[in-house]
Each structure stands twice: as C-alpha cells, then as structure tokens.
Image (tube, rainbow, N blue to C red):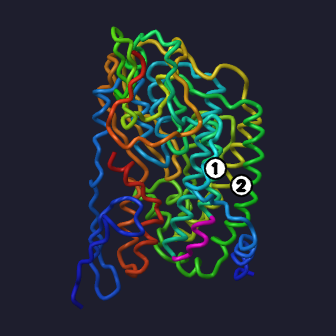
Amino acid sequence: MPYFKMTRVALKWAVSKPVTTRYPFEPRVAIPGSRGLLEFAKATCVYCTVCAKKCPTGAIVVHRSQKRWTIDRLLCISCGYCVEVCPKKSLVFTPAHGVPSVTKDREYHGA
Amino acid sequence: MARTIIPFGPQHPVLPEPVHLDLVVEDERVVEARPSIGFIHRGLEKLVEKKDFVEFVYVAERICGICSFIHGQTYCQGIEAMMNIPVPPRALYLRTIWGELSRLHSHLLWLGLMADAVGFESLFMHSWRVREKVLNIIEATTGGRVIFGSCKVGGVRRDIGSEAAAKMLADLDDIERDLSELTPVFLADRSIKDRLCDVGVLSREEAYDLGCVGPTLRASGVAQDMRQLGYAAFKDLEVRPVTRTGGDSFARCAVRCEELFQSIDLIRRALAKMPAGEIAVKVSGTPNGEYVARTEQPRGEVVYQLKANGTKNLQRLRIRTPTFANLPAVVKVLRGCELADVPVLVLTIDPCISCTER
C-alpha cells in the first residue's frame, strides 16, 4: 500500500536512537584518514621552503634564515600538497579538526 | 487578464544557490520565465593563467561543491590525454569508485531537497541521514567530505587498501538497505506523486532539441550517458543508462532513485575487479595542444576544453557544465505551469549554479 511506505520508516525511527550527536557537548569522533589539522614538527624540519613554494594559496611562509615556519590557517585549504612534497615528512595531518581559527594572525613555529 | 512579474530568487528558501527568474504570471499561471544568472561568477577559468597545470586541479575541484571530484577528474583526463600520460589501471578504478560515491551523495542531496520542496520534511531528513553515511565513506578514503582532493595529474593521491575496501562494502550494504526503505516512498507515496506526476513534461524530441543532459534527458527516454564512452574504468564495467519515458518530474526523480542502486552496483564491481599496482606516475614536461574531455556528472555531461601551448600554464580552459545545458529545459517547462509548481520545476534539473557560473 502506497500510504504505509513512509509510516514504516517513521515508526522504525520513532523508537530508534537519534543519529545526530549533541555537538558541542558531545565532541565529534574523528574519522581516521581525514585531512583535519595540519601539524608541523619543528625537530625534523630543515626549512627547505618546498612547502611554501608549492602551497596553492600561499598560506605557508617559511623564513629560512630565521628558521621560522608560519601558516595562515584561514588561507589554508587543507589540500595536503605540502604534506605530499615535504622531503623530511615534517608535516602531517591529524584526523581531528582542532580549534577553529577566528583571526587572521599567522601561526609561528620555530625560532 | 493583467500580467504581473514576480521575481523568484536569487534568494529563495527553495534555492540552495542564487539564480534569478522573472516570472510573468497571469493569475496563478506562469506565461513566461526569464532567467538571469551571474550572481556568483568567480572567474575560475581565467585562473589557468595564474596557476600551473598541476596546481589547477585544486581549483577545478572547487568549481562545484557537490560534483567536485568529477570536475578534478575531467580536468586531469584532459591534461593526461594531451601529455600522453599512461595512468595506472588501479588509479582509473579508484577514480571510478570515488566518482560513483560522488554521484551517490549528490543524488541523495537532490532527493532530500526535492522532498523539502514538496513539503515532506521528514523524508528530507531521512535522505540526508543516508547521505551522511556516504560522506563518512568519502572522508575515510579520501580525507575530505566534499572536496575529495584525491585526484591528481598522473593518477590519484590515496589508495584504498583491502581493509578499507571491506569496510566500504559493508557500509554500502547498509546504505543499500536504507535506500530500499527510502526510494519506495519517493516512488509510491501519494503526496509526492501528486506534486511530481505530469508536472513539467518534456517529450523525447523536446529534451533532445533543447540540448538536455543527464537524468533530465534520460527521464525523457533518451539513453545517453557519458559513462558509455568508457573513460576511467567504465570500459571494463558495463554501464546501461537508466531511462524512463514519462518525461515529467516524477520520471526524473525515478531515474535518480534507480541510479543510486546502479552506482552502488558499479562500486562493488569496481572493487572486485580493481587490479593491484601503482596509483600514480611521475609527470614531467608540459602540456601542448588542445583536448576536449567529457565525463558524466550526477547532473549530466560536463565538457572541458583545454588548450595549451607548451608552457606550464594553460592558454585557455572552457567548461560547459550540465546545469547550463539544462537551463533551456527549465524555461520551457515553466511556461504554462502553476505558480506553486515553480520550486519543484526549478529543482527538477538539479541546478548547480556554482558550476554554471564558475
């Protein structure tokens, strides 16, 4: 009967647990393999500037002489090109998205 | 009877994206519709002059927020054909799988929007609940939910291992179970049929003459699907276009419902047949020449015309998107319709204005 197609679905879900979570009280479970937050490992970086040259949006700026790696999180599009080209594997993506950036300040790492 | 012009859009609750229509009405009947587009033109085609041909994949993927992967794939296919890059077979299969996942989530998004347009809120939420499961598969395998970022010139960036493939198959079984509960509601529910049947009828000849593509064309009985061209791994996977003969909004809905199951079937077959090996080859040199790449997006055929002159930047890129091809059909079906049917008729071609205006 065409009348009861939706009724079946509606009744099933009336007694099931909701699929939505109570965000932000309940944090989102990060999915492994997701391109979440770009993290920089200061210890292994040789400041070769390849990531800055390849970054399609110019979010990464590296000062080789000062040994400083900087990123503008609002410009970053999380494409992963920098992670792919980094010769020392100093850049990695963590699955969790981290705290959202709300200012245009650059994030500084290094000296 | 006096004529009135009612502006519809660019901001309207039923429109996910801005398109403007001047509806000339006589009483409650639309006698003419004058569309105007151009509200979100971003000049992405022009960016080929600034971004080199490898970097431009990121721009191509961002032309559309729904069929992003297939945009990137079409662009890469064009460059690879110009440069004679032998793409590894495994990469072609992975592209096929992600392309079909993209079709799955796009059609589910459309079904939800259509349910919302006809006032069926709970069905809208159920469609998007299922879509969320598809997005989770996409996030786990590519790293992004909407912008996949996994296609590159010469292959793909990520692989799907045996464990991930097994999980994907289990998730697809779950999605198929959900879909076999949901799609009968779209196809049999009286309230949906009342809103969609015999609304916006396009005959086979009209659809063909107006240059329609994708589900809009197939719902009018023309069996045309670019996947039959055999790009990516489709040459090994037999694709039979899903067609209906009704030509009305209900037929377009039915085509999309059946294509959901077709996509699941294609992913399963692609996973079973996927050969082992490399997923990308190194790209050296620069493109030279001209190429037209065509693929099937969820909304229909997309055409990329690429022209290169041997430098690292392309000379010209022209993109013909499916929504642009389907707009004349909307103008045609709006003529003579009831004012209350306008939201359904605009949605029926699955308009993607970001694509159209680039």
Q: Residue flagged by tag 2: what amino acid is it? A: Ile
Looking at the image, is B183 positioned above or below residue A43?
below
State the residue position of label 2.
Answer: B175
B122 falls in the magenta region: yes
Q: Mark 1 lies on which chain?
A: B
Which disc, if any, is residue B227?
none
Q: Name the residue under label 1.
A: B134
- Is disc 2 in contact with disc 1, using a CB cutoff of under 8 Å? yes
Q: Is residue A91 above or below residue A18?
A: above
Estimate the x, y position of residue B10 in percent, counting from the top left. 30, 64
First in residue order: circle 2 vs circle 1: 1
Disc 2 element: helix
Separation of residues labelled 2 and 1 (CA atoms): 8 Å
Write the start and end of the magenta stretch as one range. B119-126
Per the image, label 1 sits on a secondary structure element best described as helix
From the viewer's side, name the closer residue of A9 and B303.
A9
Q: In which quarter of the image is the N terminus of chain A?
A: bottom right
In this view, the residue farthest toward the bottom is B1
Q: In this view, does B76 lie above or below A44?
A: below
